[in-house]
Amino acid sequence: MAEHTRILLVEDNPGDARLLREMLNDVTAFDYMLMHLDSMERAAEYLGTNTVDIILLDLGLPDVQGLEAVRRARSASPHAPLVVLTGYDDEAMAGRALQAGAQDYLIKGQIEPRGLRRAIRYAIERKVMEEALVAEKERAQITLNCIGDAVTCTDIFGTITFLNAVAQTMTGWTLEEAVGRPISDVVRIVDANDREVFSRTSAGLTRHDQSSHLRSDYNLIRRDGTKVPIEDSLAPIHDGHGRFTGSVIVFRDVSAARAMAEQISHSAQHDFLTGLPNRMLLNDRIEHAISIAPRHSKKVAVLFLDLDGFKHINDSPGHAVGDKLLQSVSKRLVNCVRISDTVSRQGGDEFVVLLSEVERPQDVAVTAQRMLKSVAEAHSIDQHDLHITTSIGLSIFPDDGEDAATLIKNADTAMYQAKENGRQSFQFFKPAMNVRAVERQSIEESLRRALARNEFVLQYQPKVNVSTGLITGAEALVRWTHPTRGLVGPAQFIPVAEDCGLIVPIGAWVLREACRQARAWADAGLAATTMAVNVSAIEFRDEGFLDGLFAALADAGLDPDLLEVELTETVLMKSADTTASILKTLRNKGVQVAVDDFGTGYSSLSYLRKFPVDALKIDQSFIRRISVDGGDAAIVTAIIGMARNLKLRVVAEGVEEPQELQFLQDQQCDEAQGFYFSRPVSAEQFAILLERRGLVPVPLRSAG
Ligand code: C2E
Ligand code: MG
Ligand code: MG
């Protein structure tokens, strides 16, 4: 400020002007400089080139009056404080002048020197403060517009007074449109159940004088109707006297954070490959289900599934194919249950299914049956039709366990029993099984002893020419004459033997014994029969396999033409190059090769061209369906036709019913094997069959 206070008086009445000047002179020690002009036009012109410290303005000038005078003065010198002079009868006008930006007013006729001096000083001080406040407010707004959070202010009625830039973008409302509207119009926040948080009818949070953090699962509904997940807080604003004057709501877009949090919690609870719930989530769901089931007098079922022979698929066509197969199986399983049930993957080829509200155990059996059927249907993967089956164990709450861990463990035990009963079946848990599960661990030990004590025996099942009934060969099937349990079938110990590697010495014994027996029959002058021996993947891959086989042939003195090796499809697919070369060696020596259980594994037909094989054995599951389901007979027809095309011998496995044989005759299948002709029998009994010149009665072929 200059040394003197520079005063501009705009007053057209010379008497009033003189009066004021005199009063200013009367104030002691007031150093001022007065410029007097008598119209707004001159005043504006003067202010264009001069600066003043205060304007004293008469509101009744010749060229402009009242509020218009105030406005003109303010625009001519926005920063100069303004004191208006009015008549004593016009205090109302004075009030409006203050609203329009004047700092003070004086009523003519009531002015006295000290009052005038004080009005001038206060007006100047007030102007300085106001300007500082405006600057402060501007700085606050700039700050609010710079921060990344949306900021919204309301008054005590919940009416919007301010939105910063982020709030404008996020809500879709501009500041101008939003100000004056109720908060529920502009900042529409809904909770997880889509209920409005600032509803028009409720008092609304903004009207309460308390700060709060809104729940983290809130969403903002933008003006265009789209949803944005937000995180927000609300705080009251107080004036200088601590009175509640409104609220500030701060919120931020947490889409990215929330998506990441969801993903983290999802992947902690789900299996990466299939997207199914994992072990952890399953446990929670089981515990939850068993906590509420009793209230509705319901039961809970846990199904433990393990794919049959999945290891071979993973080994031969490869992990990528195996992964896709697991994905395909998961989808099928999910389709077999209700939304409220849970299909989870435990890892590997194991799945556990929770059926949460079960009426009767029979209903669980129906679901298990549906799963067996659904999984067994061909899976189309990378242009191949893959076949896989599964075995299922079931446990029921509360009968078989009171907690998740026990229920899963018992379902697992029942699953092993299902596998032992023959794959692709389901089995309810029985308490006696726990004893058997322990037993299983000791099987390995017993197997070792069995080898040493020579407890294995072979039985032989004839293969028969479908049209003549002549026996064409024998399949050697191993059994274990267990000291206490009697005759034990291969399904109960071969998988264990494969797991622990004992299959190699067991298989070597089978080969030697089968060759010896075939030679013995020949020596006895019985009809020549080929001897088929099953070779599992682990034996086939064993480096001593070929040498052992040729040694067995040589030691027995058996013509290699009379030996046939049965391999499953998955064995063939494993490391195709080595397989092809081993097969070639066998073929060169005259040993025959048959593909066992054809149709259940990796049914890629191209490998049949690639590998030198002699015969296909159609898996019994297909034969079984001939008499049951007319549709599936088409597969058998197709396999037979294709084999004939490739000049391969076709053997139908598991023929039990006359109509199955009839069908095979009609389709001109070459050979058949099954209980219809004979069960697997001892070497002595088989010799008797051969003595009858190997003739097994077959019904006459139908005329058509
Ligand atoms: P596989 O090679 O497919 O043998 C046929 C199985 O079907 C035999 O079961 C046989 O008893 C059974 N079978 C034959 N005809 C019928 C029928 O009409 N109806 C029914 N329901 N079943 C019939 P088994 O003897 O229990 O052998 C099971 C599997 O164990 C064999 O299947 C084979 O894969 C394996 N196996 C048997 N012996 C050996 C062996 O010495 N070494 C190896 N590595 N595996 C063996
Ligand atoms: Mg076989
Ligand atoms: Mg078979």
Image (cartoon, rainbow, N blue to C red):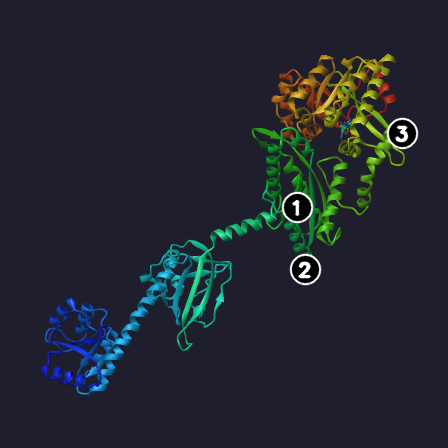
Identified at 12% across, 83% down, the residue is: 18
In the displayed structure image, the side of residue 124 where residue 219 appears, left or right: right
Kindly indicate the quadrant of the structure image that contains residue 136: bottom left
Q: Amino acid at mark 2?
A: Arg
**Count of marks, rendered view:** 3
Question: Circle 2 is placed at which residue position?
Answer: 295
- Of the numbered discs 3 and 1, the one sitting upstream in the chain is 1
Camera-nearest residue between 444 and 297: 444
Q: Quadrant of residue 700?
A: top right
In front: mark 2 or mark 3?
A: 3
Nearest to viewer (mark 3 / mark 1): 3
Q: What mark, if any, has residue 453 been given in the picture?
A: 3
Disc 2 element: helix
Image position, residue 198 (x, y; %): 44, 65
User: Crowding near pointer 1: few (<14 within 10 Å), some, many (20+)?
Assistant: many
- Residue at (78, 29) in percent of width and height: 503
User: Which quadrant is home to the C terminus?
Assistant: top right
Q: Is residue 204 visible?
A: no
Q: Residue at x 35, y 65 (%)?
A: 181
Q: Quadrant of ligand 1?
A: top right
Q: Quick one: label 2 or label 3, which is nearer the N terminus?
A: 2
Question: Which sits in the foreground, 695 or 589?
Answer: 589
Q: Tell me the amino acid under the disc marked 3.
A: Arg
* Image quarter of the N terminus: bottom left
Dot 1 beta carbon under 8 Å from ligand 1: no
Identify the residue under disc 1.
353
Q: Is residue 52 above or below residue 530?
A: below
The answer for how far apart the CA atoms under marks 3 and 1 are is 43 Å
